[in-house]
Amino acid sequence: MTILSIIILNYKTGDFTVSCVNSVFDIYKDELSKKNIEIIVVDNGSNDDSVEEISVLKKEISNLKVISNKKNLGFSGGNNLGAKQASGKYFLFLNSDTQVLDRGIKRMIDFLEKHTHVGILGGKLKNTDETNQDSAGKFFDLINIFLMLFGGEKLLRTSPDKEAMVDWVSGASLMIRADLFRKLDGFDDNFFMYLEDMDLCLRAKKMGYSTYFYPDVKILHSEHGSSNRSFAIINIYKGIIYFYKKHKGFLEYNVVKVFLFFKALIAISIGLLTRDKYLLNTYRTAIKLKT
């Protein structure tokens, strides 16, 4: 019986993905050979040598599946496709730029086995310098959105040293019960990238499941990513607008649009004064998003 399906999304990060898969194999070789654990890599239309590079690993790792998309479906769409091919009791969504350094993932499974009210569990992530990476946070109400947009994001994110209930955990290391994931219809495909993890945790909460942070695991996260800052900001804007349209009332939805507009206006003004094309192009694009 497959207990855990580890789903890794690849987009032009072949070297990182190979390193990530190998780190899982080094720690969980026995579980993989016994098919208690499976690894599913979804290539999101990289159009490079990623698929071939990753597929070579199948010679040694028998319980490795590689799925190739013709186009980039985004974080949500790509991971949802991987989940459809998964057979585990639990799913672990793991970023391609991570490395598993201990057997903490097994302890995460044990935690969910013992705590049936917990639907989602986030694992502690470490930066490459061994410092903690803030990978859990608070839901975005209006105060938190304001703080996030205007320099207070660090107040909203944390990396607890003890097991703790949190609002949401990062999709870079997110374990969820497979049956719950299916009840939720997976990640919302309308989030191409960013806020899909927060949305998933909020929907799980509405179904009566808690989200917890689990510190007794060591996963290195280099945050290499496969997108630039401009792409990230534009998609964060899209994500916030959609999140509020989906989960909040008319008044809050319109207030958050004002916040976003004001932040963009400040950035564009700075861009004009400093002749910074990055700021000008990024926030002019963000501010023109359909709402």
Image (cartoon, rainbow, N blue to C red):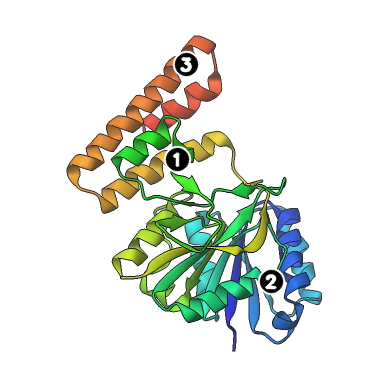
Tell me the quarter of the picture where residue 101 sits.
bottom right
State yes or no: discs 3 and 2 in contact (Cβ < 8 Å): no
Is the residue marked by circle 3 packed among few (<14), some (14-19), or many (20+) residues within 10 Å?
A: some
Q: Residue at x 48, y 58 (%)?
A: 76
Q: Tell which circle, 2 or 1, labels the residue nearer the N-terminal end.
A: 2
Q: Nearer the viewer, residue 193 or 219?
A: 219
Does residue 274 sit above or below 222 in this rendering?
above
Secondary structure of the residue carrying numbered label 1: helix
Q: Position of residue 208 (x, y in %)?
A: 31, 70
Name the mark on residue 103. 2
Q: Residue under label 1, please give it.
A: 155
Amino acid at dot 1: Leu
Q: Is residue 191 visible?
A: yes
Q: Residue furthest top?
A: 273
- Above or below: residue 76 compared with residue 230: below
Question: Residue 172, located in which quarter of the rendered image?
Answer: bottom right
Rendered residue at 29%/65% (across/down): 206
User: Which quadrant would the N terminus be assigned to in this image?
Assistant: bottom right
Judging depth in this view, the residue of 195 and 105 nearest the camera is 105
Helix, strand or loop for disc 3: helix
